[in-house]
Image (cartoon, grey):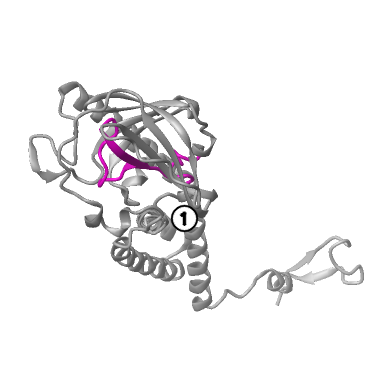
Amino acid sequence: MTRTVLRVPDSVWDPLAKEVPWEALAGRRRRPPAPAAVQAIATAITTISVLLLGFAVYIGFVARLHHDRAQFTSFANFRQELALGTAPTGQTVPGDPTRLLALGAPVAVLTIPALGLNEVVFEGTTGAVMEKGPGHLRSTPLPGQAGTSEIMGRSTTYGGPFGNLASLIPGDRFTVTTGQGVHQYTVLDIRRAGYPQPAPPAAGHGRLVLATADGGPFAPEGVLRVDADLTSPPQEAAARVLTSSRLSSAEQALASDRSAWFWLVIVGEALIIAVGLVAWTRVTWGRWQTWLIAVPVLGFFGLAVADQAARLLPNLL
């Protein structure tokens, strides 16, 4: 029987072995495949690691895109409402005093030249609402009206619109535009936990409190507030039908939206099932065929999980 031999350079093989059987060389290069179970586990671990990295990318980058898109579309809608005279001027829907404004309805535009800030303000302060931008605390009057109004905003995530709030100084001026016009405010001072509160505004006068998380990024140590007095004429306010006692706990400063747990469990289970199917098909079907189908599916469920998980973070973060 004829044997096939292969001559290899001296630098590769022992100079004393000039002729090596091809079967021996091929045997050296061929590695036995890992067991199917090991391949499936490795694929699952790799997929989960990529998804965790994706959550960090979502919080740091994709969330900002979500905020910017919401601001762009809401500004156009609110500007139209201002032009038509249908922008809200209280807690209830214009023309229907028995129905509260929906959470997330645009109610104002906050403009702070010292910060280069121009943000649509939405009704409500839950984590879901404040993904779009600053939120108006529903139990307080709207900006521009008599009394003390409050607007909360995130410091880091979803664009961090209030991230530079601490750089405001007494005397800085800014405006808030609502359905009742443009209202002028002047900053009194910055207030942190333990600082004395300023005297309440006199009857018939207005004040606005801007609030965000105090401390380092992703490590809130309390609430930072900026007090500002209304310097333009106060507007009339309709009777408030929603008081602070009726607000949900998710609308308080630094609160998390516990209702997100339900959908987080649902989409989380779907994501786990999808990861298991990907690990199985990777072994039985093939690498590229599997990833071609898996990437959009995992991307969809991964974004859904990231969105619900982000709502469990403090709403001022």
Position above or below: 152 against 75: below
Secondary structure mainly formed by the magenta segment? loop
| Amino acid marked by disc 1 | Phe
- Give the x, y percent position of residue 240: 17, 44
Q: Is residue 298 left or right of residue 18?
A: left
Label 1, secondary structure: give it: helix
The 10 Å Cα crowd at callout 1, few under 14, some 14 to 19, many 20 or more, is many
Q: Is residue 157 visible?
A: no
Q: Is residue 258 left or right of residue 34?
A: left
For the residue pair 297 and 64, the one nearer the viewer reads as 64
Magenta-drawn stretch contains 96: no
- Give the x, y percent position of residue 279: 44, 69
Position above or below: 196 against 237: below
Quadrant location, the N terminus: bottom right
Tell me the residue at 35%/25% (across/down). Answer: 231
**Rendering quarter of residue 306:** bottom left
For the residue pair 40 and 208, the one nearer the viewer reads as 208
For the residue pair 31 and 266, the one nearer the viewer reads as 266
**Rendering quarter of residue 77:** top left
Tell me the residue at 34%/35% (across/down). Answer: 207
- Give the x, y percent position of residue 107: 25, 35
Residue holding disc 1: 55
Tell me the residue at 53%/78% (across/down). Answer: 35
- Give the x, y percent position of residue 19: 83, 69
Segment tinted magenta in the rendering: 135-163
Q: Is residue 188 left or right of residue 147?
A: right
